[in-house]
Image (spheres, grey):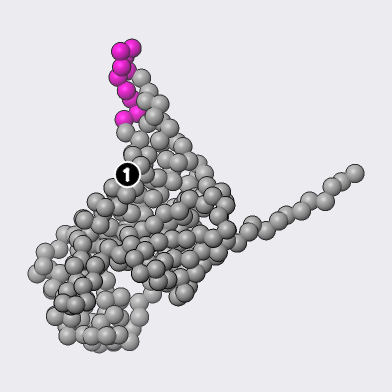
Amino acid sequence: MSLPFVVQAQELIQGIVFDKETKQRIGKVIITNLNQQTEFYNNVRGEFKISPNPGDVLVASRDGFNSDTVVFDQQSVILFNLKRSIIYISEVNVVARKSPEEILKQEKESFNKAYRLADPGSLFSVGQTGAGLSISSIYNLLSKEGRNARRLTEIIERNYQENFVDYRFSPDLVNNITGLEGDMLRRFMSNYRPSYEFTRAANQYELSQYIKSKYILFKLNPNLRHLPALPVIKMDVNN
């Protein structure tokens, strides 16, 4: 006698992303499932749907906000609350902006456990009985929790690099050098955004010369749109 084999579709869970201070919904947020190594954007209403497994670590990230992390524990609705990393003071028209280093320091403090798990430390320990393997270091290196922690720290590092480029390659700087505004300014900055490596190594004069040289190319064909770089997909064979 054979029994019927039934495959049930994984349940879709509704999620919403809020501004922690204003309680307004936030769109264009990247939702990352660290366990499944997938990511996608929510919609303009701040909503998304996802099919997580119990224990999956979910991270919501967007420029101008600190990331928020939720562990899926079979909730009926997944809620993210993002806190702004840029503080606006409208009364005096001043923007108090944290440096990338300050944001990174805050992220490391918020995810202190993840950084401890992500760094296995020395695999060897020395005790009263002599040298031997460090059990805690091996656990951090091989455990699923340790792998998730390393993925999270990689995301934080990528966010830091993007924040660093935004901090130096700012709309105010490009506007002062080129005079571009509005959609033309956004198009130029998208097409000719420098790499983190160049932005880190260049001084202010070199960065200004880079913008001037790219502006010459931009004026030749302002409607040219560069294709986005293909994403780098990392495979974890131990998963």
Q: Compare residues 75 and 170 and report the one nearer the observer.
A: 75
Q: Write down the region rendered in magenta.
A: 122-131
Residue 140, by quadrant, is top left
Q: Is residue 137 left or right of residue 77?
A: left
Where is residue 160 shown, x and y percent of the image? 28, 58
**Res. 174 visible in picture:** no
Query: For the residue labelled by badge 1, is the local secondary structure a helix, a strand or a loop?
Result: helix
Q: Residue at x 46, y 37 (%)?
A: 143
With 7 as the anchor, is 203 left or right in this view? left
Residue type indicated by callout 1 = Asn
Q: Which residue is mark 1?
A: 112
Q: Residues within 10 Å of mark 1 (few under 14, many from 20)?
A: few
Q: Position of residue 128 (x, y in %)?
A: 30, 13
* Position above or below: 181 against 123: below
> Which quadrant holds residue 207?
bottom left
Q: Is residue 119 magenta?
A: no
Name which residue lies at 90% across and 44% down: 1
Q: Return the x and y of residue 131 as percentages of the image width and height.
A: 32, 18
The quadrant in which residue 124 appears is: top left
Q: In this view, which residue lies farthest toward the left?
A: 205
Numbered marks: total: 1
